[in-house]
Image (tube, rainbow, N blue to C red):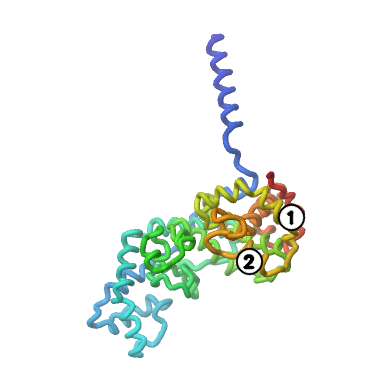
Amino acid sequence: MKKLKLFGYLTLFVSLFLSACGPKTPTYKKKLLVDTKPTEGLVFDRYEDVLFHLDTANFQEGLKSIQQQYLPFLDGDLDNPEAVRYLKSFAVDPFIVNLYQKVKQAFPDLHEVSAIVNEVYSHFHHYYPDTPLPTHVYTCVSGVDPDMPPLFFAGDALVISLDWYLNGDMVYEQMGMPQYRARRTMAESLAKDLGQLLYDTYLDKDVKHGSLLEEMVAVGRADYFIEAMCPEIADSVLLGYSASQMDWAEYNEGNLWADMVGNQCLYSTDLEVYRTFLSDGPFTNEYSHEAPPRLGEFVGLHIVRSFMDVHEISLQELMQISDLQELFLDSYYKPKK
């Protein structure tokens, strides 16, 4: 009996020791792990499957037969020969057809896409239950057009260009896409991009902030919103960093902050300072070729997380705060060197 009791004590001690030594979930993250309900009424429609299987010999008639079902793509005049010619040249272009084939390989069905959209939508509805979202979701192949966003709302529909999410396929390098941008073509980036679209559409007030600090907090708060839409997203995906860049930022956070403070960057409105800390690119040259871009965004996200660690407010209340400098002061953000 004594041995059993001793064994019980040892088991309890080991359990407590392991739980104490294991990684602790930050307070801000606990707040984001909410119960959600699946979004009802979502309908998914693959425009690319229909377009690339039209009979090219009777292309105009084929387009007209599907026009009403795919108005987000075909709301123009299909009696216009130039419009039909353009659409046909797109549908038979070898490069575009190759993209379509790659999309079919990466997404033979829409289970993964459906799960991502459902997760983001359900989290949005948890926080904003009275805001309706488009339930008709179209997928397409866009040709990775840099002038078009990877996904967007078209009236009462959500349109997703699946060729933007081919998991770093070599086709992006062949197109001349920079490696730092191609890194964001992973399927999990779709959740980030959808969260960003929701933020831009329903929450962004497009307010220009004066200082670098305010801009950092503003973009960090947008990232926090996106994280709330998909709480399991990795920081590297959220920020668009490689694993080594993520390591650099986390290891150097304290020194980076000390440098920003010491060089009086926080309240600067100088465009060159903005460029250093907020511009996209392969790296931040002012620090190192190993340093990721947009280090101001990285710091801004951590300021907002620090604020949410110490304040019992909701996501909605966080989004309504107008004084971002006060938010910073109340965050007690002070990373260790």
Quarter residue 297 falls in: bottom right
Mark carried by residue 275: 2
Q: Which residue is mark 1?
A: 261
* Screen quadrant of the N terminus: top right
* Screen quadrant of the C terminus: top right
Q: Residues within 10 Å of mark 2 (few under 14, many from 20)?
A: some
The foreground one among 247 and 67 is 247
Residue pictured at 38% horizontal, 56% vertical: 111
Residue 36: tell me if it is visible. Answer: no
Image-based side of 181 in relation to 126, left or right: left
The foreground one among 226 and 334 is 334
Q: Residues within 10 Å of mark 1 (few under 14, many from 20)?
A: few
Residue pictured at 55% horizontal, 47% vertical: 247
Residue 188 drawn at (x, y percent)? 46, 56
Residue pictured at 27% horizontal, 76% vertical: 54
The foreground one among 205 and 295 is 295
Image-based side of 112 in relation to 329, left or right: left
Residue 3 drawn at (x, y percent)? 54, 10
Residue 184 drawn at (x, y percent)? 47, 60
